[in-house]
Amino acid sequence: MDNVLVRDSISDLPESIIETILTKLPIRDAVRTSILSTKWRYKWANLTHLVFDGKCGTLCNDKGPVEDNLVKFITRLLFLHDGPIHNFSLSSAYLQSSPDIDQWLLFLSRKDIKELVLELGEGDLALTIRAPNLKYLCLEGEFKDICLENTPLLVSISVAMYMTDDIAERFEQSSSCNFTKFLGGVPFLERLIGHIYFTKYLSIGNQLGKPPITYGHLQIVELYQVSFEDMKEILVVLRLIVNSPSLEELQISGSSNTSAATEASDLDFGGKECPTDCTFGLLKTVKMTDMSGVPHEMEFIKFLLGNSPVLKIMSVTPSVYGTDARINMLIELLRFRRASPDAEITFIQD
């Protein structure tokens, strides 16, 4: 019988389609395509989107071997990779304090990285990110420090920080200005999301006055679990939004110790922190959740209502623990002056 030549139709596909196929596979399976044929040996090495998660680790209950295996796999893959890496995502609870992460970040900074996702769980990690082309950054983990250097093109940041008592104590003793260190070089930022402990972190070493840059492109700010009994955290929020002339949407959730917040010293919302000529000229939507009705919360809401001429809606959701103060909170809200004739206050009770 004549030899029948079977055409390898998959290998003849356009490179863009092959990359799409490989991107859909778990990263270990994408690397294993090297054994298919000589044509496929290093197809994976040109992937611009790399995702490392639980699927690429060794199935084992012992943390040590899992961490060692994962570190070796990622290091070797990056060493063999050829070409740019635009998206890098790492989600693992086993690498929270691995020094190899610093080396990977340095490598990625030279690979035209544009989107970086690190979800590392608990640990004690200090990150320094230098990536001149980075646009999207998502961080989640137990970080003792985060420093953004040479990241001028960032447009979106999302940060969730976990904190032990030891890390919190080191935060309090720090003399550096975390606000400047983290947000001092992101002039094109459009969206900022800060989860638990983020405003606490930014408040360390925070100096009064104008930030080193104006956030002229920042449109959306979401800050969760802001402690309104902590004067420094309130000043962080004010410093950020007052210097964001393009702000359109603001969402803040509270995390106030009611007794401590009630006894906190007065904050001058008409002084240096909040100039009387301050106007949020584009702010249309404000969402305040987990509000306890303590003085600083109410003064902050009053400040926003009185300085937002195009505001459409201000929604306020009281804390589930502050049921006794809800009626008083609602009465006070309705008395506040509104700079916008179209501003509607919505009081949401779960």
Image (cartoon, rainbow, N blue to C red):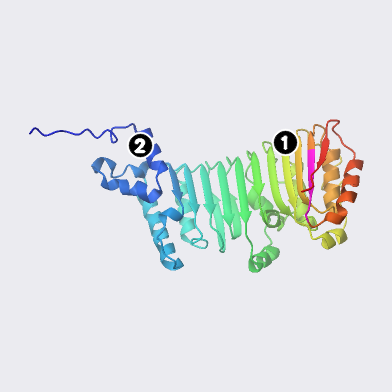
What amino acid type should be assigned to the residue bearing mark 2?
Ile
Residue located farthest toward the front when viewing the structure as drawn: 350
**Given this view, does label 1 or label 2 mark the residue nearer the observer?**
2
The residue sitting at 91% across, 45% down in the picture is 331
Q: Quadrant of the N terminus?
A: top left
Q: Give the residue drawn at x 27%, y 33%.
A: 9
Q: Nearer the viewer, residue 46 or 9?
A: 9
Numbered circle sitting on residue 198: none
Q: Position of residue 214 (x, y in %)?
A: 70, 40
Residue 157 locus on image (x, y percent): 61, 45
Position of 281 compared to 90: left or right?
A: right
Q: Nearer the viewer, residue 9 or 238?
A: 9
Which is nearer the N-term, disc 1 or disc 2?
2
Q: Which mark is residue 18?
A: 2
| Residue located beneath label 1 in the image | 248
Query: Which secondary structure, mark 2?
Result: helix
Q: Which residues are magenta?
A: 314-320
Q: Amino acid at mark 1?
A: Glu
Element assignment for label 1:
loop
The correct choice, above or below, for 297 with respect to 215 in the image is below
Q: What's the CA distance linking mark 1 and mark 2?
A: 41 Å
Q: Is residue 217 left or right of residue 267?
A: left
Q: Position of residue 160 (x, y in %)?
A: 62, 53
Q: Which image quadrant is residue 203 in?
A: bottom right
Q: Is residue 65 left or right of residue 230?
A: left
Which image quadrant for residue 59? bottom left
Residue 318 is a magenta residue: yes
